[in-house]
Amino acid sequence: QVQLVESGGGLVQAGGSLRLSCAASGRTFSRYDMAWFRQAPGKEREFVAAVTWSGSSTYYLDSVRGRFTISRDNGKNTVYLQMNSLKPEDTAVYYCAAQYYTGSYYSPDQYIYWGQGTQVTVSS
């Protein structure tokens, strides 16, 4: 079992930056591919970024590529999402998720563990 706890959300002006962290419990964190999803009010949960277990491959939603960076530190059991040049449309609850290798990263159905979410609000 893996338990995930997100932190780092908050209120920021458009153009600003935030770094989200997701701390995982358990000794098997390095076996899991990790991802960030987000959900805005009235919308479906949306893939944002994913990183493979080794950190060697990353995947991004087109609208965040070049602005967001996902990374992980297996020694600290933590995955990060660095968010730069934030826009009001990035406002959402951001969730951390883990999957045990399916080779498919974009659907929330592929993930078996989820955090409780952290709110990100970008003001214009």
Image (tube, helix red, strand yellow):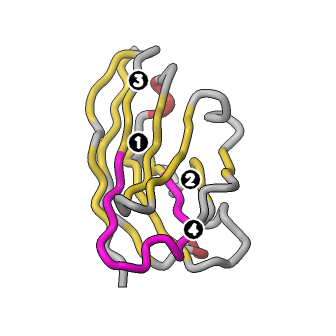
Q: Which residue is mark 4?
A: 33
Q: Is residue 35 one of those drawn in magenta?
A: yes
Give the mark, 1 or 3, whose residue is nearer the N terminus: 3
Amino acid at circle 2: Glu
> For residue 70, what is the image quadrant?
top right
Q: Is residue 7 above or below residue 115?
A: above
- The numbered mark at residue 5 is none
| SS assignment at label 4 | strand
| SS assignment at label 2 | strand
| SS assignment at label 1 | strand
- The numbered mark at residue 46 is 2
Of the pair 36 and 1, the residue shown nearer to us: 1
Q: CA distance from mark 2 to mark 4?
A: 17 Å
Q: CA distance from mark 2 to mark 1?
A: 10 Å
- Residue range of the region highlighted in magenta in the rendering: 21-37
- The numbered mark at residue 92 is 1
Q: CA distance from mark 2 to mark 3?
A: 20 Å
Q: Is residue 87 one of those drawn in magenta?
A: no
